[in-house]
Image (spheres, helix red, strand yellow):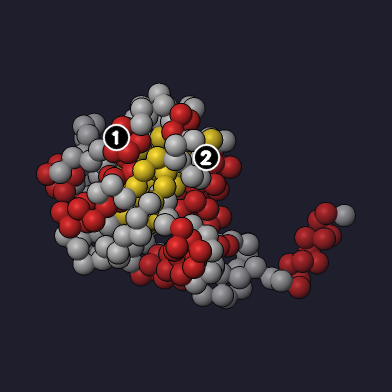
Amino acid sequence: MWQRIQTAVHLIYPPRCLGCGELTEADFGLCGQCWRDTPFIGGVVCESCGVPLPGEADGHRIECDDCMKSPRPWQDGRAALLYDGKARSLILALKHGDRPELVKPAARWMAQAGRELLRDDMLIAPVPLHWSRLLKRRYNQSALLAQHLGRQSGLDVCPDLLLRRVRTPVLDGKTAVERAETLADAIVTHPKRRHRMQGRDVLLVDDVMTSGATLSACARVCLAAGANHIFVLVLARVAKDA
C-alpha cells in the first residue's frame, strides 16, 4: 500500500532538481549538471576552518595561513561546500528565498563533511539570529541545519543555546578586526540553557563562514560558560580565491 502511495505521489509531483527545477531520479537531489556545478570540498583541508588546501596529507595537523596567523578559539572545523557558483545560489535561496526544503540535503552534505568531528554526548547548537531578523525571515536557517544534523547523528540539539542580543549590521566588506569589534558582547548564552553545555563538547553550526568572526564569538561564549571543546561545521566556506 505504502509503495503504491509513493508511486502515485511521484506521478503527480515528480522529483525535481533543487538547483534548476529539472526532473531528477530522486527527491531532494541535484541533477547531473547542477551537481557538477556545485563546488563540494574534498581532499586536503585546513583542519581548523575547512578550506581546501593544495598538497597531500602528511600525518601532521594542516592549517591554512589565516588559521596559523590567528588561531581559532575552536578545536576543529569543516565545511561541505565552497561559497561559489551553484552552492552560493542554493544558500541564498535557503537564506532569503524561503526554500527550507534545501535543509535536508544540505544537512546530509554537512554530516558527510563533518563526520570526523562528531563525538559521543556532543551538543549541537546553531549560530543565533537576532529576533528582528527571525521575525522577518520566519526561520533561522542555521537552526534548521542543526536540527537535521541532530536527527542524522542522534546527538542532542539545543536551538537556543546562544542568543544574539544585538542586531549587528551586515558584516560583508568589513575587515576581520572590524567584524570582531562589531560582534563584541553581541552574543550571549541563554541563562536557562548554559548548564547543558558544561563539561560537554559543542558543535557550532552555521550556513556560511567568511572570516569566522561570528563563530569565534560563539565559541568564546561557550568556553566561558564551561563547555569542553568547541567544533565548527558549516555548509559553505568563503575562500579568498572564490
Question: Is residue 148 among what the camera can see?
Answer: yes
Report the front residue among 181 and 37. 181
For the residue marked with disc 2, what is the amino acid? Val
Q: Quadrant of the C terminus?
A: bottom left
Are the residues at dot 1 and dot 2 in contact (C-beta closer than 8 Å)? no
| Comparing labels 1 and 2, the label whose residue is closer to the camera | 2
Which label is found at residue 106? none
Residue 231: horizontal and vertical position, in percent? 35, 38
In the rendering, at what x and y percent does residue 140 appear? Answer: 48, 57
Marker count (numbered): 2
Type of amino acid under label 1: Gln
Q: Up-down: is 70 above or below 100?
A: above
Residue 11 picture location, percent across and down:
76, 71
Considering only vertical position in the picture, is 87 above or below 128? below
Quadrant assignment, res 13: bottom right
| x 24%, y 31%: residue | 59
Crowd around label 2: few <14 · some 14–19 · many ≥20 (10 Å): many
Visible in this render: residue 141?
no
- Horizontal side of 155 relative to 113 (left or right) equals right
Residue at x 49%, y 27% (from the top left corner): 121
**Which disc, if any, is residue 75?**
1
In the displayed structure, would residue 94 be above or below residue 156? below
Is 43 on the left-hand or right-hand side of 22?
left
Tell me what residue is drawn at x 53 percent, y 35 percent.
155
Q: Which residue is mark 2?
A: 157
The kind of secondary structure element at disc 1 is loop
Q: Quadrant of the N terminus?
A: bottom right
Is residue 216 found left or right of 31 in the rendered image? left
Residue 17 percent location from the top left of the image: 56, 69
> In terms of secondary structure, where does tag 2 sit?
strand
